[in-house]
Image (tube, helix red, strand yellow):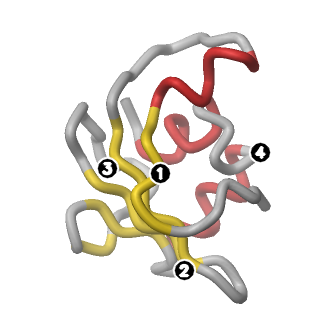
């Protein structure tokens, strides 16, 4: 699954366009490498997102095309940072 789509489906970032912009601006890394919006993600990858004043580090544990809001939090585990979303 594309990185920008994963960020939207998992509700880490609310809109895909914002997820795409974050990737294009170099604020998202997968396994310590800056990632493009089209980068494929897989289970076990570590995503790091730099927001304006904080960082979020999460491990991907599940990938699904469609999930309900309640199930979205089961797609990743927060390693570092807050769950507070942009």
Camera-side mark, 2 or 4: 4
In this picture, residue 15 sits left or right of residue 71: right
Q: Which residue is mark 1?
A: 78
Quarter-of-image position of residue 84: bottom right
Reading the image, the residue beneath label 4 is: 14
Sequence-wise, the earlier of marks 2 and 3 is: 2
- Residue nearest the observer in this picture, 83 or 11: 83
Q: Residues within 10 Å of mark 3 (few under 14, many from 20)?
A: some
Labels 1, 4: front one: 1
Where residue 73 appears, x then y in whole percent? 59, 30
Residue where numbered disc 3 is placed? 39
Residue at 47%, 28% in the rendered image = 75
Q: Quadrant of the C terminus?
A: bottom right
* Mark 3 touches mark 1? (CB < 8 Å): no
- From the viewer's perspective, tell me whether residue 2 is left or right of residue 71: left
Element at label 2: loop
First along the sequence among labels 3 and 1: 3
- Secondary structure at numbered mark 4: loop
Please state which of residues 71 and 15 is positioned toward the viewer in this rendering.
71
* Picture residue at 37% right of the left edge, 23% below the top: 62
Kindly state the secondary structure of the residue where label 3 is placed.
loop
- State how far apart marks 2 and 4 are (Cα): 17 Å
Callout 1: 10 Å neighbours few (<14), some, many (20+)? Answer: some
The numbered mark, 2 or 1, whose residue comes first in the sequence reads: 2
Quadrant of the rendered structure where residue 43 is?
top left
Marks 1 and 4 sit apart, C-alpha to C-alpha, by: 17 Å
Residue 55 location (% of width, % of height): 55, 76
Of mark 2 and mark 4, the one earlier in the sequence is: 4
Query: Looking at the image, is 42 positioned above or below residue 20?
Result: above
């Amino acid at each position: 699954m594309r990185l920008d789509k994963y960020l939207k489906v998992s509700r880490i970032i609310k809109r895909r366009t914002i997820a795409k912009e974050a990737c294009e601006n170099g604020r998202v890394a997968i396994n310590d490498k800056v990632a493009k919006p089209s980068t494929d993600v897989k289970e076990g990858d570590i995503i790091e997102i730099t927001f304006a004043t904080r960082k979020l580090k999460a491990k991907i544990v599940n990938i699904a095309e469609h999930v309900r809001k309640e199930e979205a939090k089961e797609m990743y585990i927060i390693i570092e940072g807050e769950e507070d979303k942009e």
